[in-house]
C-alpha cells in the first residue's frame, strides 16, 4: 500500500508539471512536438520537470537541449505562441524572450550565451484595484491555459532568433529559491521586419536573482501588486 501511495504521488507531481513542445504561428500550432522547438532535457521533455536554480545553465534553454528539426518562419508583427502540454498548472507570469542569432552563427548550434536576450512579451498579474491578488486564474491570465500567445513588435528586425518561453510557477515561492521555471526555446526566422533596436538586453543565467520580488509570493501579508522579474518588455 505504501508503494502504491508513493507511485500515485509521483504521478500527481508529474501531471502538475508541464512543457512547451510546439510553436503556434498566427493561431496554427505545429503538427508535432519538438519540431521548431528544441527538445528539452529528459527532466522536462519526458518528466515535465522545471528549473528552480536561476544560476543554472538550464535557465536559458535547458543545457544540452537538442536542436530543432526545423526553423519556423514568422512575419514581424504577427502572433507567436507556444502550446503548453498538460496546461499551465501553476499560477504565475508567462514571458517571452528573444535573442537574435548573429549573422555568422548557425541557428542549429548557437546557444544564446551572453547579454543577448530581450523581453518581447509578458502575461502577468491583473491589477485588482488595490485589493489582494490571488493564486487563481482571475489574477493570472495564463494560469490553466493550454497555450500562450504574444504579438511580435512590427519593428522587430528580420533575421534568425531563438524564442524562449517561460512560465514562472509561484505556488512554492514563499522563500527565495522556491519559484519554478517551465521553459522552452524555439528556432525562428523573422521576415518583413523593421528597424527597431530591441532591448534592454540580459543574459541567462544572470537576468534573475533568487530574491527578486517577482520571484517571491508570500502567503501573508497578501500582495496587492505584482511586477514580473526581468527587464521591461520591448514594444518596438
Image (cartoon, grey):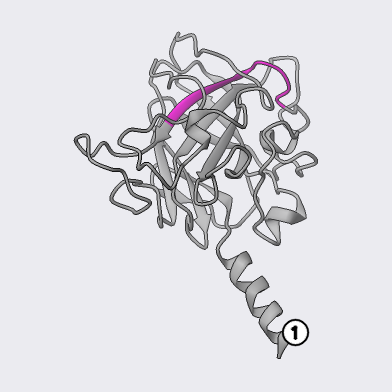
Q: Nearer the viewer, residue 63 or 128?
A: 128
In this view, 97 is above or below 134: above
Instruction: Label 1, secondary structure: give it.
Output: helix
Quadrant in the picture for the N terminus? bottom right
Residue 31 in percent (x, y) is at 54, 57
How many labels, in total? 1
In this view, 30 is above or below 131: below
Quadrant in the picture for the C terminus? top left
Say whether residue 116 is magenta.
yes
Residue 4 in percent (x, y) is at 70, 86
Q: In the image, which residues are magenta?
A: 112-121
In this view, 2 is above or below 175: below
Q: Look at mark 1 in the image and give the residue it sits on.
A: 3
Q: Nearer the viewer, residue 182 or 67?
A: 182
- Outermost residue on the front side: it is 221
- Outermost residue on the bottom side: it is 1
Residue 225 in percent (x, y) is at 32, 33
Say whether residue 36 is magenta.
no
Q: Nearer the viewer, residue 95 or 105?
A: 95
Question: Residue 36 is drawn in which quadrant?
Answer: top right
Density class for disc 1 (Cα within 10 Å; few <14, some 14-19, many ≥20) is few
* Relative to 119, 59 lies left or right: right
- Outermost residue on the left side: it is 129
* Relative to 51, 200 lies left or right: left
Q: Nearer the viewer, residue 59 or 136?
A: 136
Residue 114 in percent (x, y) is at 71, 18
Question: Residue 224 is drawn in which quadrant?
Answer: top left
Amino acid at each position: 500500500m505504501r508503494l502504491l501511495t508513493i507511485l500515485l504521488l509521483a504521478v500527481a507531481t508529474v501531471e502538475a508539471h508541464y512543457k512547451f513542445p510546439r510553436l503556434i504561428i498566427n493561431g496554427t500550432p505545429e503538427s508535432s512536438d519538438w519540431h521548431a522547438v528544441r527538445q528539452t532535457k529528459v527532466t522536462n521533455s519526458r518528466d515535465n520537470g522545471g528549473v528552480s536554480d536561476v544560476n543554472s545553465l538550464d535557465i536559458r534553454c535547458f543545457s544540452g537541449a537538442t536542436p530543432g528539426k526545423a526553423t519556423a518562419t514568422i512575419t514581424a508583427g504577427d502572433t507567436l505562441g507556444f502550446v503548453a502540454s498538460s496546461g499551465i498548472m501553476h499560477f504565475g507570469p508567462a514571458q517571452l524572450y528573444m535573442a537574435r542569432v548573429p549573422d555568422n552563427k548557425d541557428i542549429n548550434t548557437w546557444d544564446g550565451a551572453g547579454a543577448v536576450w530581450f523581453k518581447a512579451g509578458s502575461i502577468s498579474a491583473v491589477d485588482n484595484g488595490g485589493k489582494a491578488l490571488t493564486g487563481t486564474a482571475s489574477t493570472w491570465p495564463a494560469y490553466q491555459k493550454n497555450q500562450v500567445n504574444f504579438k511580435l513588435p512590427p519593428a522587430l528586425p528580420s533575421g534568425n532568433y531563438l524564442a524562449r518561453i517561460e512560465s514562472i510557477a509561484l505556488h512554492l515561492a514563499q522563500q527565495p529559491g522556491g519559484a519554478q521555471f517551465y521553459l522552452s526555446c524555439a528556432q525562428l526566422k523573422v521576415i518583413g521586419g523593421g528597424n527597431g533596436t530591441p532591448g534592454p538586453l540580459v543574459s541567462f543565467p544572470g537576468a534573475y536573482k533568487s530574491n527578486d520580488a517577482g520571484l517571491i509570493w508570500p502567503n501573508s501579508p497578501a500582495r496587492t501588486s505584482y511586477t514580473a522579474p526581468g527587464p521591461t518588455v520591448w514594444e518596438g
